Amino acid sequence: MKASQFFISTLKEAPADAEVVSHKLMMRAGLIKKLGAGIYNYMPLGLRVIRKVENIVREEMNRAGAVELSMPVVQPAELWQETGRFEKMGPELLRIKDRHGRDFVVQPTSEEVITDIARQELRSYKQLPKNFYQIQTKFRDERRPRFGLMRGREFIMKDAYSFDRDQDAAKASYQVMATAYRRIFDRFGLTYRAVAADSGAIGGDLSEEFQVIAATGEDAIVYCPQSDYAANMEKAEALAPVAPRGAATQVLTKTATPGKSTCADVADMLGVPLATTVKSLVLATDTTNESGEIVKSQVWLLLLRGDHEMNEIKTAKVPGLDGFRFATLGEIEEYFGCKPGYLGPIGLKKPVKLVVDREVAVMADWICGANEADFHMTGVNWGRDLPEPDVVADLRNVVAGDRSPDGKGELAIERGIEVGHVFYLGTKYSRAMNATFLDENGKPQPLEMGCYGIGVTRLPAAAIEQNHDERGIIWPDAIAPFTMVICPVGMDRSEAVKTTAESLYAQLLAAGVDVILDDRGERPGAMFADWELIGVPHRVTIGDKSLKEGLVEYQHRRDAAPTKLAVSDIMAHVKGCMTV
């Protein structure tokens, strides 16, 4: 490709609404152009990146035995009504009507449609296993679309769905996909982690997220530097303390703490470590009738150490707490006789269900609210001041320095951007939609399913968050819009520069290198600034002065200075530097 024939449109400044680095640089480099909130045009440079991502995904999915198809973006609501998701999904699901008043959805995902295909086509155990995938446009009506392609409303995703006869076969299909995903992300040239993820209501351990490591990532990744353990924050287990509970050494005392309603303020006022305080979280669960009306509510009190944070996913797994909500102010005053900020387990007005985090269960001489404004209880001890807790559970987010669940060291935490997820679905959709096959005995059995997604348009944004500097983007070779750029200086004034540039360009094309020749006639400073902003990883500069010495300059996007090479050596050097 020659730059004069291509479309390059760079900006010196990012739009005011661009917040994160990837959004700013993609806009400045001319990769995307905003059309509406969370909706972008993929400009020629950006589309080249997306197509390279798609090609890698497609090659590895095909290699793993998956079969490509394409499902409609607009889908009949009837299928979504079969699974209940038409009603259960929130406003993120874009619902529309056609001219006849029939309901449709703009798909954010395609479990219903692929299950409909499977129940019509996969009728015998002899047809299994099967894995279908697509690379397709999706739409999720985000309330606050932001960060460019990181959290847009319209996006491109690769979603795959496996179908098997039983759990063992489904787990084997899952492992095939998990292996394929590692090959895919290895080829992207990004630093990533595959982390164990929570499986939600389906249960089980077969769920992994693929996270691109980036300081700006929204997700916290927990890992052990001494082992292969890695999990997302929702999944990572906080082990029970090894040391036994200490003996009581303080007298239970009602202590004045005027205006101190947080654990941190109380600890600061009393001159004690925050870890000696206990926070009280009040939750509620509702029982409803057939009409969905609440007929009874149960109030729960959760106790966590003052320096720890509740993990809502773990909390929802405590028996009875599935579907919990935070208690209302009225409920809190009814059961505790006090406003939030001074709550505790001693002296309640009405009984509640008590659940205690593992750390709190082994604490002695701790501090909690006294259920009276401006007062806390100090010197609280289990057994003496209140009964031993009935329910002890892992309720909290892990913190750096906690013991690794695999027993091989301490945990560390870093930030990541989720770009892929592999997940064992089981029979959730097949049972809801009566998708069955006939086994060897001629009996119908529900299909066992798995689903596997990659955020095709999110991935370039994640790559930029991980690979950039003050000058612009630094693409890995595999997904760069062009792998190499030839920058001839004064091409219009020097026949030698023009001839050398066009000869090298032809040689690189013949060798299969994705190269662009910048023949626009730009000044060197402007030309270099464009390609550094765009992030093309390899650059060859050809100038009249160097050519007189038989030399050209090669510079990788990460190099601080160029390397001078003989014209005859440039092809071998360039090919040796490339990773694709």
Image (tube, rainbow, N blue to C red):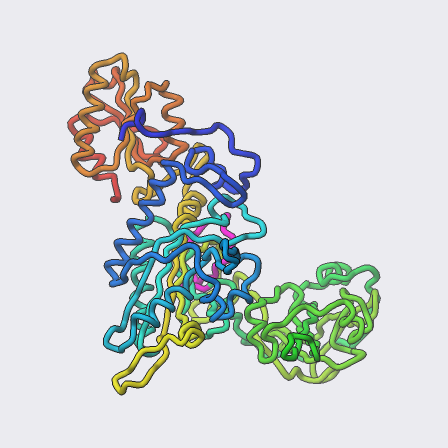
* Residue 367 sits in quarter: bottom right
Residue at horizontal 74%, vertical 76%?
345
Image coordinates of residue 526 in percent, x first then y, are: 40, 22
- Above or below, 428 against 580 in this view is below
Image coordinates of residue 444 in percent, x first then y, are: 33, 82
In magenta, the rendered stretch is: 212-231
Give the left or right position of residue 259, taking residue 149 as reference: right
Question: Is residue 542 magenta-colored?
Answer: no
| Res. 386 visible in picture | yes
Q: Residue furthest front?
A: 100
Question: Is residue 215 magenta-colored?
Answer: yes
| Res. 229 visible in picture | no
Quadrant of image for the C terminus: top left
Residue at horizontal 68%, vertical 63%?
274
Quadrant of image for the N terminus: top left
Residue at horizontal 27%, vertical 56%?
60
- Above or below, 239 against 105 in this view is below
